[in-house]
Amino acid sequence: MVKTTIRAVGLTKAYGSGDARVLALDDVDVEFEPGFTAIMGPSGSGKSTLMHCVAGLDRPDAGRIWLGDTEFTGLKDDALTALRRDRIGFVFQAFNLLPTLTARENITLPFDLAGRRPDPAAVRSVVDVVRLGDRLDHRPSQLSGGQQQRVAVARALVTRPDVVFADEPTGALDSAASAELLGFLRGSVDELGQTVVMVTHDPAAAAYADRVLHLADGAIVTSSC
Ligand SMILES: Nc1ncnc2c1ncn2[C@@H]1O[C@H](COP(=O)(O)OP(=O)(O)OP(=O)(O)O)[C@@H](O)[C@H]1O
């Protein structure tokens, strides 16, 4: 399976103005190839800003971004939203599950949002990968934090997106649940050929990645494999 690369050149983004101006991204060039990449760096170094820009959740002030052959720059908001929905998966620290839906309904939500029927084989395979078989009819409040995050990972994977972005996905989990979750993300790379990009503060989490990018003051300072 050939998975798509995300490529960005000259990404620049500032917040505020005058004395309060902060350069969150300073002319960053970066490429995310198939595999598992971790983004690390001190608080305020620009990790979230970089992830939000390359995931199409936010727009840079300058620079260009491509998902495969599709360039983000110049896409209208509707087109960017459709591209995100169809080709990118997200896992956030706070799980972001809908409380009134069951685990199964949360997992199939991306299909509902796209007006498509869920693909039963795709649902079965992600449910197997994250081992949720006996919990599918539970609502989030009836699941542990680790189980809720497994639902969030299944939802991110179910459409087989080109890239899954995970922002501190283990931030709210204990160490056993974190290890399990990182194992699932690793498994999605090894078994499904998924591209995963994860922001983390935790070196133990970054150790699951193939490549670690270190940010400081809005720039990539090192990239290690
Ligand atoms: N909406 C905003 N308004 C003003 N400044 C912002 C905004 N978002 C981010 N910043 C600033 O931009 C810089 C980069 O922030 P960013 O959230 O990308 O860093 P981070 O590395 O993800 O930090 P953390 O690890 O604490 O989440 C910081 O100085 C931050 O204060």
Image (cartoon, grey):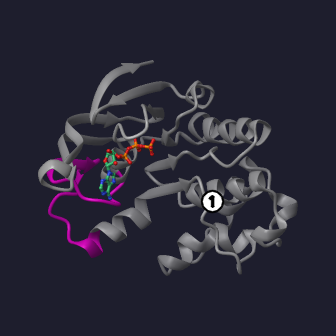
Residue 38, percent across and down? 48, 33
- Residue 30 in sight here: yes
Mark 1: few, some, or many residues within 10 Å (few <14, many ≥20)?
Answer: many
**What kind of residue is marked 1?**
Phe
Quadrant assignment, res 9: top left
Please count the marks in the image.
1
Quadrant assignment, res 203: top right
Question: Is residue 19 found left or right of 96 in the rendered image?
Answer: left
Give the answer, above or below, for where 11 lies relative to 114.
above
| Quadrant into which the C terminus falls | top left
Residue 161, percent across and down? 47, 55
Task: Tell me if the residue at label 1 has its CB under 8 Å from ligand 1.
Answer: no
Q: Residue at x 22, y 36 (%)?
A: 28
Residue 33, percent across and down? 38, 35
Q: Which residues are magenta?
A: 55-79
Residue 21, percent across and down? 18, 49
Task: Say if the magenta span includes residue 69.
Answer: yes
| Nearer the observer, 165 or 144 | 144
Give the answer, above or below, for where 50 lies relative to 89.
above
Question: Is residue 121 found left or right of 34 in the rendered image?
Answer: right
Question: Is residue 193 found left or right of 52 in the rendered image?
Answer: right
Q: Residue at x 61, y 31 (%)?
A: 205
Residue under pointer 1: 95
Task: Say if the magenta span includes residue 188.
Answer: no
Q: Residue at x 82, y 72 (%)?
A: 137
| Nearer the observer, 102 or 42 | 42
- Residue 63 in sight here: no
